């Protein structure tokens, strides 16, 4: 009787375990279908072999996400390089010719002068506009050094005293990155938050439950930067890292595109979290490399 009861219990546990694995498979399949490669499923209630497999799948998802983002950035860099080159080749002769006509005695003081000057001014503005976008293709190489993240993060609030800050980096945490680039990316994110009428900003490290048993050899850290400003609409969220895309009346649409390039130049990544930190409307994830 005891053996039969034990057998029934084992069968029930086995069935429950298989259902758990099936649920994991469905969750991962759904994530892949939605092109969400940032998933990290917990490894609780798994046998050692299954735990190793889940850890590998978690890391694979993160690596695919990095590769896709890098490929997208490189595609936009190539397109921007071609467009700026072609536009400048077309604008340069217009500037030269109109400038020569403006200086000509045959034009000065005639009705043509105002029209030609308008053409020259427009071509000059276009050249200046295009030149600003060359930043997307002329990013300086990163100077990778050990950076104390706690010291870095606690230096940010002094730059924005009107914001209410919540910082959760209680222990010294280091990363290998370019400090100047990291500061510029953080500044860009905070400026966007202020423009979205944020009053509170939260900065913390992504924490995993102690029972998750994620791989100890995980080589990255994730810095979560959240704010309570206006939420980013779902239809806009997919476009925010595309160069020249902006919802601002006076925006140029290169801030977040350059920010992501900088994070990648440092070996990390930058993306918008699908689910913000509780109590906030928007969360950006800054991924950095462990020392």
Image (cartoon, helix red, strand yellow):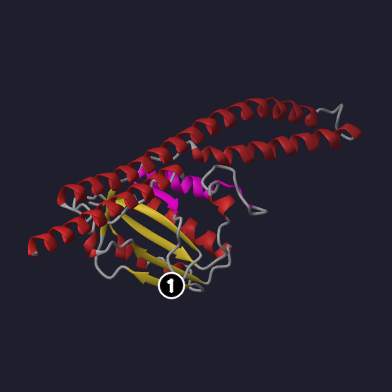
Q: Nearer the viewer, residue 44 or 180?
A: 44
262 within the magenta span: yes
In the rendered view, does 277 fall on the left or right side of 148?
right
- x, y percent for residue 17: 24, 55
Residue placed most toward the observer, 46 or 73: 46
Residue 267 in sight in this render: no
Element on which disc 1 rests: strand
Q: Which percent across, then down, holds residue 183? A: 40, 56
Q: Which residue is mark 1?
A: 165
Which residue is pictured at 34% across the width and 46% down the height? Answer: 62
| Stretch of the chain drawn in magenta | 251-272
* x, y percent for residue 142: 35, 43
Q: Is residue 198 magenta?
A: no
Q: Residue furthest front?
A: 1
Q: 134 or 8, which is in the foreground?
A: 8
Seen at 42% across and 50% down, the residue is 270
Q: Quadrant of residue 208?
A: bottom left
Q: Nearer the viewer, residue 60 or 110?
A: 60
């Amino acid at each position: 009787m005891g053996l039969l009861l034990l057998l029934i219990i084992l069968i029930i546990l086995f069935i429950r375990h298989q259902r758990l694995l099936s649920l994991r498979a469905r969750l991962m399949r759904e994530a892949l279908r939605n092109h969400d490669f940032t998933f990290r499923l917990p490894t609780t209630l798994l046998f050692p072999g299954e735990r190793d497999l889940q850890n590998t799948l978690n890391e694979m998802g993160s690596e695919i996400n990095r590769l896709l983002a890098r490929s997208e950035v490189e595609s936009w860099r190539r397109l921007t390089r071609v467009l700026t080159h072609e536009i400048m080749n077309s604008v340069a002769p217009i500037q030269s010719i109109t400038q020569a006509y403006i200086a000509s005695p045959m034009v000065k003081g005639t009705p043509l002068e105002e029209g030609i000057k308008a053409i020259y001014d427009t071509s000059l503005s276009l050249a200046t506009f295009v030149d600003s976008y060359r930043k997307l293709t002329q990013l300086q190489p990163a100077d990778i050094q050990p950076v104390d993240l706690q010291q870095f993060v606690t230096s940010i609030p002094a730059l924005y005293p009107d914001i209410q800050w919540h910082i959760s980096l209680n222990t010294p945490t280091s990363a290998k990155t370019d400090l100047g680039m990291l500061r510029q990316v953080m500044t860009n994110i905070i400026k966007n938050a202020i423009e979205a009428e944020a009053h509170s900003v939260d900065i913390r490290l992504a924490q995993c439950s102690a029972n998750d048993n994620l791989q100890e050899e995980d080589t990255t850290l994730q810095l979560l930067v959240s704010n309570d400003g206006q939420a980013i609409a779902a239809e806009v969220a997919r476009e925010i890292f595309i160069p020249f895309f902006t919802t601002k009346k006076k925006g140029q649409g290169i801030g977040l595109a350059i920010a992501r390039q900088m994070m990648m130049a440092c070996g990390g990544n930058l993306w918008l979290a699908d689910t913000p930190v509780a109590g906030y409307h928007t969360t950006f994830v800054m991924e950095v490399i462990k020392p």
